[in-house]
Image (tube, rainbow, N blue to C red):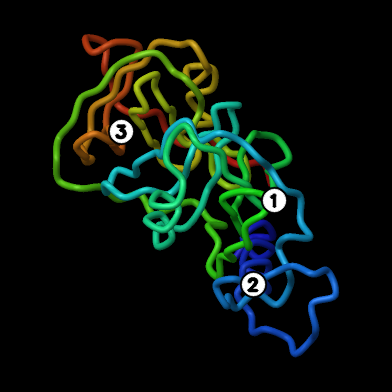
Amino acid sequence: MDRRTALLAGLATLVAGPVLSQGNSSGGSNASGGRLWFDPTQLPSFTGVVERYLLTPEGKTDRLMFREGPQVLFPEHIADDIMQAVSPGQSIVVYGIRARRAPAITLLAWAKDGDSAARFVDRPAWTFPEYRAADEMLQVSGTIRAPLYTPQGDVIGAVLDEGVVIRVPAGVGQALGDKLAVGRSIAASGHGATVQNRGKALDAERIGESPDKLGPLPAPAERPQ
């Protein structure tokens, strides 16, 4: 286990650890009875309008995009609660941690507005999701609206103008470099999922600038030691 992995594992253990028997001196409210040992509403808050919810290649949901730009990452098991409470075009208050080098926010608590009680997340999305997908073979193309980020701010793919998600393995995003920059044309094919009225997402197996220029994924870039 390298130093970075160990730090993430330690942080995840702290966040998911048992609640300490202490009063809440900050006045925060744990509306969901979560297992967090601290009050996430003491963390920075981010308020924005939900532009859209983004799919995973399994057809699930693990993030939203603010109309203002940032991506908010959360575990799949709370997606239904958030989507039922806050529709695209509505605002949401998010408490969490923003990546140092990218507009990616790991959600630890959320509320419909500043007057609503916060709902805590007991298993936050700290790590890069396993590279797996549904069985549908897809081919997509379009203009990159935003890079797709891990909680730490690493690029792992792209979000296209129509909300289509192209995901690549960890390290491949770094190897692709500015080919995943905003405004670039991109095409990809691979297995994924389509959800009616929601869009589609795939794990790229071939990628290129256009559908007629698809090629194999580059080898992952080596992470500096």
Residue contact at pointers 1 and 3, CB within 8 angstroms = no
Question: The disc labelled 1 sits on which kind of residue?
Answer: Ile
Of marks 2 and 3, which one's residue comes earlier in the chain?
A: 2
In front: 151, or 190?
151
Farthest left residue in view:
136
Of marks 1 and 3, which one's residue comes earlier in the chain?
A: 1
- At a point 25% along the width and 22% down the height, the residue shown is 140
Distance from the alpha carbon under mark 2 to that under mark 3? 39 Å
- At a point 75% along the width and 90% down the height, the residue shown is 21
In front: 104, or 92?
92
Which residue is tagged 1?
97
In front: 118, or 222?
118
In front: 69, or 50?
50
In the rendered image, the quadrant that contains the N terminus is: bottom right
Residue contact at pointers 1 and 2, CB within 8 angstroms = no
Which residue is tagged 2?
30
The disc placed on residue 196 is: none
- Relative vertical location of residue 111 with respect to residue 178 in this rendering, above or below: below
Question: The disc labelled 2 sits on which kind of residue?
Answer: Asn
Percent coordinates x, y for residue 198 in the rendering: 28, 36
Between marks 1 and 3 in the image, the one whose residue lies nearer the viewer? 1
Distance from the alpha carbon under mark 1 to that under mark 2? 18 Å
SS for tag 2? loop
The picture quadrant where one finds residue 174 is top right
Between marks 2 and 3 in the image, the one whose residue lies nearer the viewer? 2
SS for tag 3? strand
User: Would you call the spot at circle 1 few (<14 residues within 10 Å), some (14-19), or many (20 or more)?
Assistant: some
Percent coordinates x, y for residue 168 in the rendering: 39, 36
SS for tag 1? strand
How many marks do you count on the picture? 3
The disc placed on residue 204 is: 3
